[in-house]
Amino acid sequence: MSKIFKEFLFLKRKGVYEKVAISNIMFLQVSGDYVSCCLKTEELFTIRVSLNKLSELLTPHDFMRIHRSYLVQLSFIESINFQEDFVIIGKNQIPMNRDSKKRLGQLITKLE
């Protein structure tokens, strides 16, 4: 597979597939049978695919499943609240589960 196609996804909107850079995806959120894909421009794509499938595709690109309904790109996390179990990405407060809280704690360098 070409390197360029490993850095982009083609997401369908109104019958047309649009090329989206994986580096522009802030987070993905499950809503029923659909997944909302939020870009750094705050543009949303709603696609019908499982979060598990997207997780397989995006984990090598520094994405982490932090909740059963959320997959986030780690570089977009602005703050982590370990006391109330959420992260902030843009204007969005995203919950995290115990496992991801532990993994994030191990990944980051905390200075106090």
Image (tube, rainbow, N blue to C red):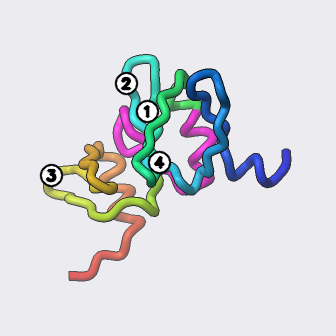
Residue 10 relative to residue 35: left or right:
right
Q: Residue at x 40, y 48 (%)?
A: 42
Task: Indicate the secondary structure of the residue bearing disc 1.
Answer: strand
Identify the mark at residue 84; answer none if there is no mark: 3
Q: Residue 36: x and y, percent? A: 43, 33
Q: Amino acid at mark 1?
A: Ser
- In the picture of the structure, the residue carrying the numbered disc 4 is 39
Q: Residue 8: x and y, percent? A: 67, 47
CB atoms of marks 1 and 2 within 8 Å:
yes
Q: Residue at x 37, y 45 (%)?
A: 66
Q: State the separation of the CA atoms marked 4 and 2.
A: 17 Å
- In the picture of the structure, the residue carrying the numbered disc 2 is 31
Q: State the separation of the CA atoms marked 1 and 3.
A: 24 Å
Q: Residue at x 14, y 57 (%)?
A: 83
- In the picture of the structure, the residue carrying the numbered disc 1 is 36
Q: Amino acid at mark 3?
A: Glu
Q: State the separation of the CA atoms marked 2 and 3.
A: 23 Å
Crowd class of label 1 (few under 14; some 14 to 19; many from 20; radius 10 Å): some
Q: State the separation of the CA atoms marked 3 and 4.
A: 25 Å
Q: Residue lying at the far right in this picture: please name it.
A: 1
Q: Residue 13: x and y, percent? A: 57, 28
Q: Residue at x 63, y 41 (%)?
A: 57
Q: Residue lying at the far bottom in this picture: please name it.
A: 112
Q: State the separation of the CA atoms marked 1 and 2.
A: 7 Å
Task: Indicate the secondary structure of the residue bearing disc 2.
Answer: strand
Identify the mark nearer the N-term, 2 or 3.
Answer: 2
